[in-house]
């Protein structure tokens, strides 16, 4: 490749050292005898064989893409959709007088009355209890607050967070895109937008925060300023300020969601659990990024190989140096490159906390460290 001239490694007649007054140093002669194994091979083949070790393929198998299935193949009922998709965030509630809705057209938020009826509120909420992109306190938003318009007069979300369906889909990373299995129908996607608005904007959602203020300990939250790793490991504990737990949702809303999405496709891992899917997609995306990086390194190595081949041709033509010496120069340059690359690789392993010469310890990835609040509520 690269169009470089193919040069035999055997010395040409006119370049033979035999009878030459400039007899090579004994060390050089021994090195040349060592590289005599290349004497019948083209120089470009030798360069290719050595340079190919600069970028070795990964031995680990790439993670598989999560399976995609139709909604009605993953969730048999609306109950399974609301409870499985969001882990323990929601509960399917058939007594709708005791349940909340993720969307409404009323002038006032009906969820406020539900919270009071359930004894969760004695006055209007003046604080946003969930904490990720949320505001500190609920309040009105500007006239261009249209995507989540039911909460315009009293919202825990800022316009910038929910300015469009696309903005909400992309808020927590590509692993949380709800259309990883292909574009959703408009009627199906609308339910994901409504859920996102509900989570981001409705003050009542914070009443079902998993680690509420009575149990939350910032020493256990690795996203909090007061996080204490030693304490969290000894306890052990793993808190956050964004996750919801068992908020009752109207059965009719969950059923309508499944009806709208029944023929659309979604990730089927772990019975359609959004957060399991997100963790698997993250692993796939990281592997793809690593592969792209290796391909880039390989391409750079191939360019270097072609450049070396061209330099060998020029060096031989201009200096008359014996091909064996040329091979030695090229090989030493490539070996130096391998040493540098190997050193950088070892340093990268050390910095990543996975030293090559240390005892290997299996670490379980906590999927909730990848979980984003938009979709696991």
Image (cartoon, rainbow, N blue to C red):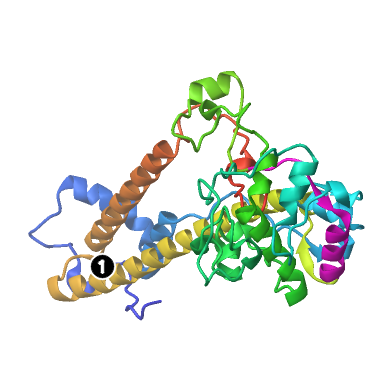
**Pointer 1 residue:** 11
Q: Residue furthest front?
A: 123
Q: Secondary structure at mark 1?
A: loop
Q: Residue 195, relative to residue 261: is it above or below? A: above
Residue 297 in magenta stretch: no
Sort mark 1 into few (<14), some (14-19) or many (20+) by Cα contacts within 10 Å: some
Outermost residue to the left: 21
* Residue ID at (61%, 57%): 175
**Image quadrant in which you'd find residue 5:** bottom left
Instruction: Please state the horizontal and vertical placement of residue 154, each as a whole percent of the image.
Output: 59, 56
> Which is nearer the eye, 191 or 38?
191
Q: Quadrant of the N terminus?
A: bottom left
| Left or right for 159, reference 209 | left
Position of 44 with respect to 190 (left or right) is left
Name the spot of residue 190 as percent of width and height, x first. Answer: 72, 70
The boundaries of the magenta stretch are 243-262
* Residue 220 percent location from the top left of the image: 55, 28
Left or right for 20, reference 326: left
Could you tell me which residue is drawn at 33 percent across and 78 percent down? 4
Camera-side residue of 244 and 274: 244
User: Residue 312 falls in which quadrant of the image?
Assistant: bottom left
> Of 109 and 328, which appears nearest the observer?
109
Q: Residue at x 71, y 48 (%)?
A: 276
Residue occupying the far bottom of the picture: 3
Answer whether residue 40 is visible to the viewer in this image. Answer: no
Q: Position of residue 61 (x, y in %)?
A: 63, 52
């Amino acid at each position: 490749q690269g169009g470089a001239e193919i040069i035999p490694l055997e010395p040409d007649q006119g370049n033979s050292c035999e009878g030459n007054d400039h007899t090579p140093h004994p060390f050089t002669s021994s090195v040349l005898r060592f590289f005599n194994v290349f004497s019948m091979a083209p120089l470009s083949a030798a360069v290719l064989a050595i340079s190919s070790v600069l970028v070795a393929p990964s031995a680990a198998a790439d993670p598989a893409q999560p399976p995609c299935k139709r909604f009605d193949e993953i969730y048999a009922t609306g109950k399974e959709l609301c409870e499985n998709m969001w882990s323990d965030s929601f509960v399917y509630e058939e007594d709708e007088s005791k349940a909340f809705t993720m969307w409404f057209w009323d002038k006032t938020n009906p969820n406020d009355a539900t919270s009071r009826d359930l004894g969760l509120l004695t006055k209007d909420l003046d604080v946003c209890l969930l904490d990720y992109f949320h505001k500190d306190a609920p309040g009105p938003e500007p006239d261009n607050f249209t995507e989540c318009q039911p909460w315009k007069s009293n919202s825990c979300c800022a316009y910038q967070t929910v300015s469009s369906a696309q903005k909400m889909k992309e808020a927590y990373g590509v692993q949380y895109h709800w259309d990883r299995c292909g574009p959703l129908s408009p009627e199906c996607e609308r339910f994901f937008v409504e859920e996102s608005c509900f989570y981001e904007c409705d003050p009542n959602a914070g009443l079902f925060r998993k680690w509420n203020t009575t149990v939350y300990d910032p020493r256990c939250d690795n996203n909090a300023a007061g996080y204490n790793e030693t304490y969290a490991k000894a306890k052990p504990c793993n808190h956050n300020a964004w996750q919801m737990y068992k908020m009752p949702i109207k059965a009719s809303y969950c059923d309508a969601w499944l009806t709208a999405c029944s023929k659309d496709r979604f990730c089927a891992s772990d019975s359609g659990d959004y957060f399991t899917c997100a963790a698997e997609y993250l692993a796939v995306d990281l592997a793809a990024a690593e592969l792209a990086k290796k391909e880039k390194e390989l391409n750079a190595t191939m360019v270097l190989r072609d450049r070396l081949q061209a330099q060998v041709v020029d060096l031989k033509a201009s200096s008359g140096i014996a091909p064996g010496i040329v091979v030695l120069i090229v090989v030493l340059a490539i070996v130096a490159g391998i040493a540098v690359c190997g050193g950088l690789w070892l340093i990268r392993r050390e910095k990543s906390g996975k030293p090559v010469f240390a005892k290997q310890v299996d670490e379980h990835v906590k999927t909730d460290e990848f979980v984003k609040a938009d979709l696991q509520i």
